Image (cartoon, rainbow, N blue to C red):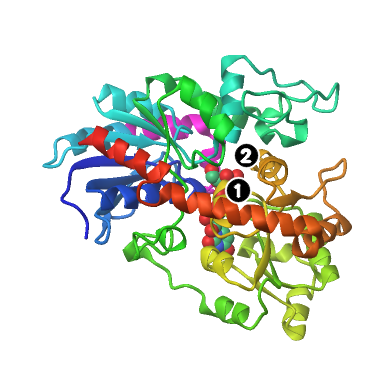
Amino acid sequence: MSEAKKGHVLFFPYPLQGHINPMIQLAKRLSKKGITSTLIIASKDHREPYTSDDYSITVHTIHDGFFPHEHPHAKFVDLDRFHNSTSRSLTDFISSAKLSDNPPKALIYDPFMPFALDIAKDLDLYVVAYFTQPWLASLVYYHINEGTYDVPVDRHENPTLASFPGFPLLSQDDLPSFACEKGSYPLLHEFVVRQFSNLLQADCILCNTFDQLEPKVVKWMNDQWPVKNIGPVVPSKFLDNRLPEDKDYELENSKTEPDESVLKWLGNRPAKSVVYVAFGTLVALSEKQMKEIAMAISQTGYHFLWSVRESERSKLPSGFIEEAEEKDSGLVAKWVPQLEVLAHESIGCFVSHCGWNSTLEALCLGVPMVGVPQWTDQPTNAKFIEDVWKIGVRVRTDGEGLSSKEEIARCIVEVMEGERGKEMRKNVEKLKVLAREAISEGGSSDKKIDEFVALLT
Ligand SMILES: O=c1ccn([C@@H]2O[C@H](COP(=O)(O)OP(=O)(O)O[C@H]3O[C@H](CO)[C@@H](O)[C@H](O)[C@H]3O)[C@@H](O)[C@H]2O)c(=O)[nH]1
């Protein structure tokens, strides 16, 4: 049962699934601790508000300035339009919410949208920045904003190792993609660095990580800002099980049924025998890279489950899906219940782009990884996966950023049955225990959530 309601909090996630999910998960945890939560999603499509009974979370859409016929990614290109229109919509939404019977006390916003902080401050709310990417990437952006790290003009000229407090030395390949060369991704570079432009005015800063995962980085952070690490906010069923109904990232009334056929297929495979491959919700690999991965998997001879979004399927080698089905060697699905899959005993390793949610999920479920990072925070996450936590390996690339089938196959075999693979499995099991402890009653993240709730009530 939920506690009696204590206060009302607005959540304002950056409108991408990988950012919305950690907000939903925090809202569920806060709701169980007595907070009423409203999730505000900036969108070009209007949807009537709906409430999830289980968690007292209401979801509202506000207009982001784009039109239904425009490409869903237009808002990532025309940043000014997104900023100006969404600012107006957010101001209107908060102003009218303040006149309601249960006015909000606080706004939890994604620092990808620093304008939300200014709006909430002007409207007299307690303002909370919630990072859904790890400190590993965010701190690099912070140092760029502060002028304490100068992004090189050419990543290949004079390659030096970048040094940041609490970090191992980072090569250009380990840095977040927006931070390894001046002029590459200029819009996105400015976008991620701007997160820190007004951050000091936030009343509190949260992050979806846990203290024991990045202890050196966290120690440095704690000396600078009022930070609370409240993660991992992976659904409770796969962690502490204190919210038994919290089985996935969705809210009750929009749930899609899990794809039983995938789990049934896994059920017929021996323990730790299947290679699971997935690249999250955004990454679009080149056709060449998809083919190298497909050939690598076939070459290793392991059973595989590959989640390939509809838009990516045409990049697979022709006949690949049919041959896998015929030989019963693998399954290509359009979308899989990833948490259920990673929790399945048949899974031996996870070939991943190292998005932060996927990384936390693998770690919480004790699955070693083969990292094929593509961009944004993924290279830095992969560096920690391989060299700091030692729970996986990262595939190397050639001068054009392509990983060959031989290299991918070598990494998969190493994790599945090499000596290092055994160590990785032990290390990931240890992190799994620490992750569970952090979010369980009295754990570091649970305490931080309680402290946070106390600030709001
Ligand atoms: O078949 C699938 C494939 C994915 N997922 C889920 O989709 C999410 C993917 O999230 P993530 O691993 O973070 O990848 P992206 O969707 O690519 O996330 C974006 O946002 C993240 C958080 O900011 C960043 O770390 C990434 O680099 C960025 O690409 C995870 O929860 C997965 O469980 C499924 O449930 N089924």
Between 278 and 245, the one nearer to me in the picture: 245
Lateral position of residue 457 relative to residue 85, left or right: left
Residue 25 seen anywhere in this rendered image of the structure: yes
Looking at this view, name the residue that lies furthest to the top: 147
Q: Mark 1–mark 2 contact, CB under 8 Å?
A: yes
Q: CA distance from mark 1 to mark 2?
A: 7 Å
Mark 2 falls on what kind of element?
A: loop
Q: Residue at x 41, y 64 (%)?
A: 247
Quadrant of the drawing holding the C terminus: top left
Q: Disc 1, ligand 1: is the CB inside 8 Å?
A: yes
Q: Residue at x 70, y 21 (%)?
A: 151
Residue 367 occupies quadrant: bottom right
Pointer 2: what residue? 377
Q: Which residues are magenta?
A: 70-88
Amino acid type of the residue that numbered disc 1 sits on in the rendered structure: Gly
Residue 355 shows which numbered tag?
Answer: 1
Amino acid type of the residue that numbered disc 2 sits on in the rendered structure: Asp
- Is residue 425 highlighted in magenta? no
